[in-house]
Image (cartoon, helix red, strand yellow):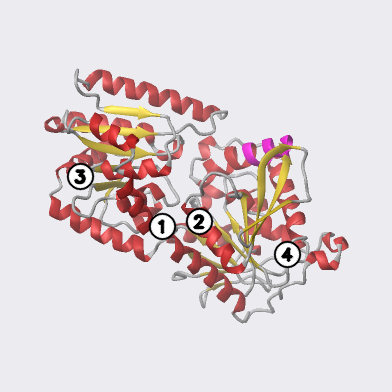
Amino acid sequence: MPRTVIVSNRIALPGAQRPGGLAIALLAALRESEGLWFGWSGRSGAATEIPQRYRERGIDYATLDLSQDDVDDYYRGFANRVLWPLLHSRVDLVDYHRECSDGYQRVNAGFARALARELRGDDVIWVHDYHLIPLAAQLRRLGVGNRIGFFLHVPFPPADLAATLPHHRELFDPLRAYDLIGLQTQADAAHLAEYLQAHAGLRPPGDGRWRSDETRATRIGAFPIGIDTDAIAAQAADAIALAEVRRLRDSLGGRRLVIGVDRLDYSKGLPERMRAFERHLQRHPDLCGQLTYLQIAPHSRSDVPEYRSLRAELEALAGHVNGAHARPDWTPIRYVNHDYPHSALTGFYRSASVGLVTPLRDGMNLVAKEYVASQAAADPGALVLSRFAGAAQQLHEALLVNPHDADEVADAVATAARMPLAQRRERWAAMMATLRASDIGAWRRGFLQALTETAREPAQDGARAAPSPSVAARGLAALAPAPLLVPGSLLSKGTL
């Protein structure tokens, strides 16, 4: 069985905090093949290209340290200040500096050199997220012919927005070096295919294949990520007994709970959400005093000016709404920056009659899925969900809203609060069936199967590069730059 090699910016090291659902899924893939997880250690100081190695329960881990300059350019500068806003269609917040772009490419090249030494000839390599877009191209330059897949956890913007980035082809053209590119939704996959056609010179498909003059074909498909549905449902049922959850429920005084849980980020639409809740109070006075809105928003990237500004705006908004609408025995909004254990969060979800998930743009949004999975079958809550979250493409039975329309969101909260039990049960059952059919395990298996099948397809427009022998076995001389293998592209609309 080929070994799975997973590459990500950060990894779930043995002995670290309990891994989340994504890490659990990746660990399962690694255990099946006694695989390798490669990435940044999270430490800065003296940069290393000889990985620190760990092994636990049949899985190998290899991590690299970065210099402070690398962290500033690659991670803080380019990944956080350029790619994150660009991929979320916030081109107004892109803060591009050439030295940060150079640092991003430099770190990816260093990762490729270190990883190439670890590879075996039949390894299947799975690269994760926007931090590592150029990695496959860097590996191909080193002669690596292994199967390489890439999954983008965040959205991909429309082609013309992606092209607003200075030197955008330098960033996005290397995506064609992957055998398989997975995105969260069909819309994201179509945006990427449109970009490659409009800006990378690929011809429109006549037979389903995006073609260029080169020999490698790349498949692009939608692989919506899931959650560990049944495990979260069981955890939420048990969490009712937790002291934190009991205190929350007792504090409501019989009122119903509306909950939002988001990282403090401008993509989550938190100011718009608070304004929409105020509109709810104004438009539906009969519900005033009956609902308490709890917004949990742990601090994120507090060294970035935009995030400090967002925090100040939310604090002012919460104060304004409470000042205008609170009563001596009731506060409409509880705004909390504390980070809670996942077990407690699922108990909070189960306690909430309304889940309020209204990002301006989100690749998937697993909070929406976890809210649904946490509900009690006998008396489930209702989900209000942004149309611009990837989860909206699967959770059709949610109350779908435009997060920019405060009146629409306000009315949806009221509809959710008034929804009859029979309708809530019907909607919840349909969403749970979707979540169980497309859970985190199905996502993992589907992507890896598609990567294997893509690599084994006969290349009708040229010979596909065969998996290469271990770079380490060929000696370090093999690490000299070689011509880049630039692929064509195939858009697959039914990969899963």
Residue 222 lies in the magenta-colored region: no
Q: Which of marks 1 and 4 is in front?
A: 1
Quickly name the residue at label 1.
228
Dominant SS of magenta comes to helix
Mark 3 neighbour class, 10 Å CA radius: few under 14, some 14 to 19, many 20 or more: many
For image coordinates 85% across by 59% down, the residue present is 480
Mark 4 closeness class: few <14, some 14–19, many ≥20 residues within 10 Å = many
**Which disc, if any, is residue 452?**
none
Q: Crowding near pointer 1: few (<14 within 10 Å), some, many (20+)?
A: many
From the top left corner, tell me how far across and down residue 279 is, in percent: 23, 31
Three-letter amino acid code of the residue under disc 1: Asp
Q: Can residue 194 be seen in this view?
A: no
Measuring from the top left, give residue 375's x and y in whole percent.
27, 50
Q: Name the residue under label 4.
A: 119
Of the numbered discs in the image, which one, if any, rests on residue 416?
Answer: 3
Residue drawn at point x = 23 percent, y = 47 percent = 381
Residue 24 badge: 2
Q: In the image, what residue type sits under mark 2? A: Ile
> Of the residues under marks 4 and 2, which one precedes in the sequence?
2
Q: Is residue 68 magenta?
A: yes
At a point 35% along the width and 28% down the height, the residue shown is 335
From the top left corner, tell me how far across and down residue 488 is, in percent.
Answer: 62, 69
Q: Distance between the residues labelled 1 and 4?
A: 30 Å
Q: Tell me whether circle 2 and circle 3 mark residues in contact (CB < 8 Å).
A: no
Picture layout, residue 224 above or below residue 64: below
User: Which quadrant of the view contains residue 285?
Assistant: top left
Quick one: SS at disc 4?
loop
Quadrant for the N terminus in the image: bottom right
The residue range painted magenta reads 67-76
**What SS does tag 2 mark?**
helix
Q: Which of 176 and 348 is in front in this view?
A: 348
Three-letter code, disc 3? Ala
